[in-house]
Amino acid sequence: MLKIGVLVSGGGSNLQAIIDKIESGYIRNVEIVTVVSSKPGVFALERAKKYGIDGTCISRKFFNNIDEYDEALIGHFVEHKVELVVMAGFLSILGERFNKYYTNRVINIHPSLIPAFCGKGFYGIIPHRHVLESGVKVTGATVHFVELEADTGPIILQKAVYVEEGDTPEILQKRVMEQAEWEILPEAIKLFAENRLVIEGKKVLIKKTAPVPAAASKQYSI
């Protein structure tokens, strides 16, 4: 059973998409063991509570520096034996210590087709505003492995969404979530759990079949 921890900052619609795919049996041998929010009182924590999932807030503002924040997150995930960290709309920055500790074990959903409309400062509704201002006709979402520099890790999956006449940033954001994000983030978790992802340099290869039915359990220590 692959144990995952989900990082959130808001309503948790991507978290719900993951839960739904696990509940339906589409994603097998995966358990969400903890949900961590960067902000207190967000609805994502209510979603976790509804399904009996551990939920807590670990806010960056409670720590003196990024290293202390990293250590707190690592300690929490180690305590829960987390093997894969999923950033599902998480707006805080993860530091070098966290990225090194969970190398190739952190994935993120980004609301554009990387390498377009991504990087530092491109989060939430901001990418959608830039998409509309640029006049491009196709946008979408990307799931990628996380590296220290924002939105630079190897791409796992992408899905395109057409920009339509009359779109506002809010309308486009909703359509990208519904048509792309809610599909490819659970799919990436499924592929990881089935041990079908192979990183070669900056590329992710997806194997047709897995040598083992699920990712082997691995214990971590600080």
Image: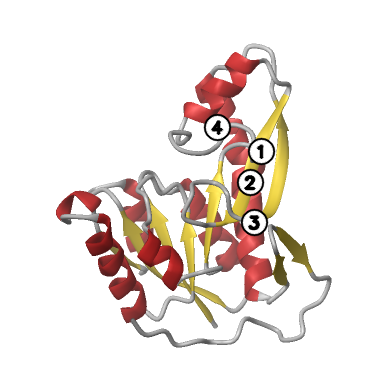
* Alpha carbon separation for disc pair 3 and 4: 25 Å
* x 44%, y 68%: residue: 100
Residue 113 has which mark? 1
User: Does the residue at mark 1 contact the one at mark 2 (Cβ under 8 Å)?
Assistant: yes
The type of residue carrying mark 3 is Pro
Q: Eyeballing the image, is 57 above or below 206?
A: above
> What residue sits right under mark 2 in the picture?
142
> What residue sits right under mark 4 in the picture?
174
Mark closer to the observer (3, 2): 3
Mark 1 or mark 3, earlier in chain: 1
> What residue sits right under mark 3 in the picture?
154
Mark 3 or mark 4, earlier in chain: 3
Mark closer to the observer (4, 1): 1
Q: Nearer the viewer, residue 188 or 177?
A: 188
Image check: 103 left or right of 216?
A: left
The residue carrying pointer 2 sits among few (fewer than 14), some (14 to 19) or many (20 or more) residues within 10 Å by Cα, namely many
